[in-house]
Image: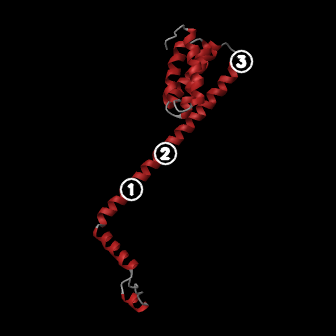
């Protein structure tokens, strides 16, 4: 078997440099396709700006929902011990309905729906509680600890109206 001969330094210096050859080819391609590269860069930057904006507004919306939920919960806890459940329901219902209508898809909106379903149950509004619990089944599908609470509330509400098939 023949031994592979090593190239001498002088021979290596006579050959073109790989990095310079590659980079010059890339520069030639960039110059040739300059308009396409400019469009691609512009579209990429526009997508980054749009996605960042959507994320910013989504986070801001979640914070607003969380703040409204906190305010509604503090109002609920203030009047809960002093009034009957039906009166409490009447007072906090508008706040929770607003949160559900505007922020129902956010995490705080889903938690508000769970709390509001429990308030409806306590006030004797079993049909409304059942409707909310059924929505919550899809909202908390991936949260096993919460889904058990939802199923329990749904079962108790169905038992109150003697609907054993739901």
**Front-most of residues 15 and 70:** 15
Give the residue at mark 1: 44
Extreme residue toward the top, this view = 162
Count residues near mark 1 (Cα–Cα under 10 Å), then give few for <14, some for 14-19, many for 20+.
Answer: few
**Residue plotted at (43% across, 90% down):** 9
The kind of secondary structure element at disc 2 is helix
The kind of secondary structure element at disc 3 is loop
**Front-most of residues 134 and 68:** 134
Quick check: 18 left or right of 91? Answer: left
Which is nearer the N-term, disc 3 or disc 2?
A: 2
Extreme residue toward the bottom, this view = 10
**Residue plotted at (63% across, 31% down):** 70
Count residues near mark 2 (Cα–Cα under 10 Å), then give few for <14, some for 14-19, many for 20+.
Answer: few
Extreme residue toward the front, this view = 1
The circle on residue 55 is 2
Marks 3,2: beta carbons within 8 A: no
Residue 99 quadrant: top right
Above or below, comparing residue 29 to residue 108 in the picture = below
Above or below, comparing residue 88 to residue 105 in the picture = above
Give the residue at mark 3: 81
**Residue plotted at (32% across, 59% down):** 39
Quick check: 80 left or right of 50? Answer: right
């Amino acid at each position: 078997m023949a031994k592979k001969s090593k190239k001498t330094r002088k021979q290596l210096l006579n050959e073109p440099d790989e990095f310079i050859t590659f980079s010059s080819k890339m520069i030639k391609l960039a110059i040739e396709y300059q308009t396409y590269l400019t469009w691609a860069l512009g579209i990429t930057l526009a997508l980054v700006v749009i996605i960042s904006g959507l994320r910013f507004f989504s986070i801001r919306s979640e914070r607003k929902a969380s703040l409204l939920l906190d305010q509604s919960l503090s109002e609920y806890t203030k009047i809960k011990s002093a009034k009957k459940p039906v009166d409490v329901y009447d007072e906090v219902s508008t706040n929770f309905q607003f949160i559900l209508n505007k922020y129902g898809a956010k995490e705080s909106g889903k938690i508000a729906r769970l709390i509001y379903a429990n308030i409806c149950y306590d006030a004797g509004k079993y049909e409304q509680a059942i409707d909310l619990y059924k929505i919550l089944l899809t909202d908390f599908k991936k949260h096993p600890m919460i889904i058990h609470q939802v199923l329990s509330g749904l079962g108790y509400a169905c038992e109150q109206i003697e609907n054993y098939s739901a």
